[in-house]
Amino acid sequence: MARFNLKAAQNAALMALGEHGESVIANLDAVGLVIVRKADLPREAKEGRLLHDVRLHLPDGWTDPYHVTVTGGGLEEPVTWGVEFAAISTVREAAALQRTLGYQVNLRVDEQAGLITEATAAES
């Protein structure tokens, strides 16, 4: 079951809505609606561009908003993408396997949204 970071979504909404943000959110809450980030929503498994044999560069203490710099895989220069909420654990695992055991990492990315949506690791 997907977990949503509702507090982070609400904070982002408050910043985007400005001065009257709290009342807008209160009105939404009153009718049973919540705000979620698009990055937290599941995607179709086949959406996005597939990149093979990439290198993941995660910063020390990798935390929200979970950005990763990616090299290789046919990219002309390093690209930094966010990570879809549902893919955070697989990206973390793939990076660890790559770093410690030299595994090959493949990614599926939604370039329009600037998000990594899936990561897999396999022995080279």
Image (cartoon, rainbow, N blue to C red):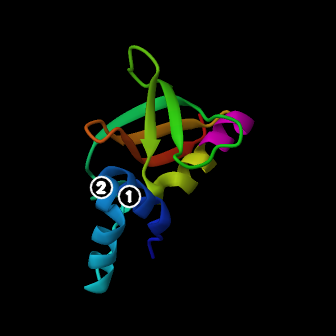
Q: Residue at x 25, y 37 (%)?
A: 112
Residue 20 locus on image (x, y percent):
30, 61
Q: Quadrant of the N terminus?
A: bottom left
- Inspect the image, locate mark 2, and give the three-letter code of the amino acid beneath it: Leu
Residue 26 locus on image (x, y percent):
33, 76
Q: Is residue 38 visible?
A: no
Main secondary structure type of the part rendered in magenta? helix
Toward the bottom, the furthest residue is: 31
- Inspect the image, locate mark 1, and give the three-letter code of the amino acid beneath it: Leu
| Tag 1–tag 2 contact (CB < 8 Å) | yes
Q: In this view, does 1 lie to the left or right of 16?
A: right
Query: Can residue 102 be found in the magenta stretch?
Result: no
Q: Specify the segment rendered in magenta.
A: 95-101
Residue linked to disc 1: 14
Which label belongs to residue 93? none
Q: Which residue is drawn at 62% across and 37% down?
A: 103
Q: In this view, does 62 lie to the left or right of 34?
A: right
Q: In which quarter of the image is the C terminus?
A: top right
Q: Is residue 47 left or right of residue 83?
A: left
Question: Where 113 falls versus 46 (above or below)?
Answer: above
Q: Can residue 85 be seen in this view?
A: yes
Q: Residue at x 33, y 67 (%)?
A: 35
Q: In this view, does 7 lie to the left or right of 20?
A: right
Which label belongs to residue 17? 2
